[in-house]
């Protein structure tokens, strides 16, 4: 009789644990759905960051030698392990900032999906262990 009570308690504990794991799996699924949204957008992307740059040109008599640096807006990115930079025409700054920001959002989503995928697999492994039973009595 004590064995039956023990088995029922185990079943109750397993059901509660399984319920908690399923809730976690649903939460992760919703988080994944939100994270994937940038992948469904259709706008063009531009790799890199648009930023303001201040620099000295190197000319001996230039005002930049006295602290009045040259300024421009450019797009910086990495290609083949090297940093690249190209000046952005003033009429394209807003457009390239948006496309660059969209690219960054997609890259962040990709990284988050990797982390969420590992968490989901971990929860599925736990569900498997909770639901698993031996086919034969020992």
Image: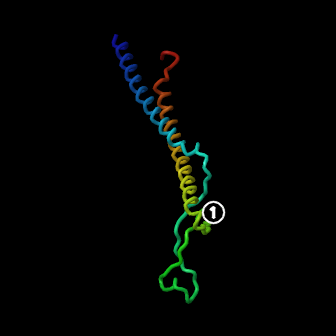
Which residue is farthest top?
Answer: 1
Residue ID at (52%, 17%): 135
Q: Is residue 89 above or below residue 132?
A: below
Which residue is farthest right?
Answer: 80
Question: Foreground residue, 115 or 64?
Answer: 64
Total number of numbered labels? 1
* Spot occupied by residue 121 in the image (x, y as percentages of width and height): 52, 36
Colour convention of the picture: rainbow
Q: Is residue 6 above or below residue 57?
A: above
Residue ID at (36%, 17%): 6
Report the residue marked by disc 1.
81
* Spot occupied by residue 115 in the image (x, y as percentages of width and height): 51, 44
* Spot occupied by residue 123 in the image (x, y as percentages of width and height): 48, 34
Residue 73 occupies quadrant = bottom right
Residue 87 occupies quadrant = bottom right
Which residue is farthest front?
Answer: 91
């Amino acid at each position: 009789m004590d064995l039956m009570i023990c088995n029922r308690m185990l079943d109750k504990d397993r059901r509660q644990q399984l319920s908690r794991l399923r809730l976690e799996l649903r939460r992760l699924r919703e988080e994944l759905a939100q994270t994937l949204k940038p992948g469904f957008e259709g706008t063009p992307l531009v790799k890199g960051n648009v930023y303001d740059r201040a620099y000295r040109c190197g000319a001996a008599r230039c005002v930049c030698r006295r602290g009045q640096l040259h300024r421009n807006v450019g797009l910086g990115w990495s290609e083949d392990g090297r940093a690249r930079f190209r000046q952005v025409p003033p009429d394209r700054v807003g457009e390239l900032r948006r496309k660059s920001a969209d690219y960054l959002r997609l890259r962040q989503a990709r990284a988050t999906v990797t982390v969420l995928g590992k968490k989901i697999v971990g929860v599925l492994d736990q569900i498997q262990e909770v639901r698993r039973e031996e086919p034969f009595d020992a």
